[in-house]
Amino acid sequence: MGGGGVLAPPFLLPLSMKVLSNAQNNELSFVKAPMMENISFTISLTKIVGSKEYVFDNLYDKFEFDSAKDFIVLDLDLTEQNVAGGEYKLELSDEFRVYGRYICNVVDYTFEQSDSTNDLFSSTVRVSNL
């Protein structure tokens, strides 16, 4: 018989990386599952190092579950909630089930390219919003 194998438990499967920017409105897209119809979602962020957790609920698909779309897009507003930068476990769920678990990087800094005409500083990058 051909090489079947044992399927790994869900927590051992490769995870996708999501990226969020702190102090901004973010859009996260997810593949639409058949049971996702006109429901609100919850996104929880749990810090990988430490014990901080953030929960965002009552999130709705930006495209209102348009049958022509293969993805849902959720707006996650981080302008009012200050989320510390770093790596998180992101979980997408509703009141009945968990749809996916992802690794998420919350970025709380920006890179600014120097516009100096001085040759010494013209290729420098400044990290800000630390």
Image (tube, helix red, strand yellow):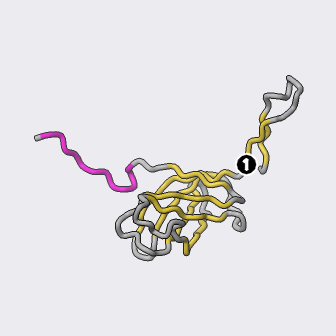
**34 lies left or right of 55:** left
Relative to 3, residue 97 above or below: below
Q: Under tag 1, what secondary structure?
A: loop
Q: Position of residue 102 (x, y in %)?
A: 48, 55
In this view, the residue farthest toward the right is: 118
Q: Position of residue 119 (x, y in %)?
A: 86, 23
Q: Position of residue 26 (x, y in %)?
A: 62, 59
Type of amino acid at the residue the image marks with label 1: Tyr
Going 63% across and 52% down the picture, which residue do you hit? 86
The magenta stretch spans which residues?
2-13
Q: Position of residue 37 (x, y in %)?
A: 41, 72
Picture quadrant of residue 57: bottom right
Q: In what quadrant of the picture does the N terminus appear?
A: top left
Relative to 123, residue 6 above or below: below
Q: Is residue 70 located in the magenta-colored stretch of the structure?
A: no
Going 58% across and 69% down the picture, which residue do you hit? 55
Residue to which mark 1 is pinned: 109
Picture quadrant of residue 88: bottom right
Q: How many marks?
A: 1
Going 58% across and 59% down the picture, which residue do you hit? 27
Q: Main secondary structure of the magenta part?
A: loop
Picture quadrant of residue 84: bottom right
Going 58% across and 70% down the picture, which residue do you hit? 56
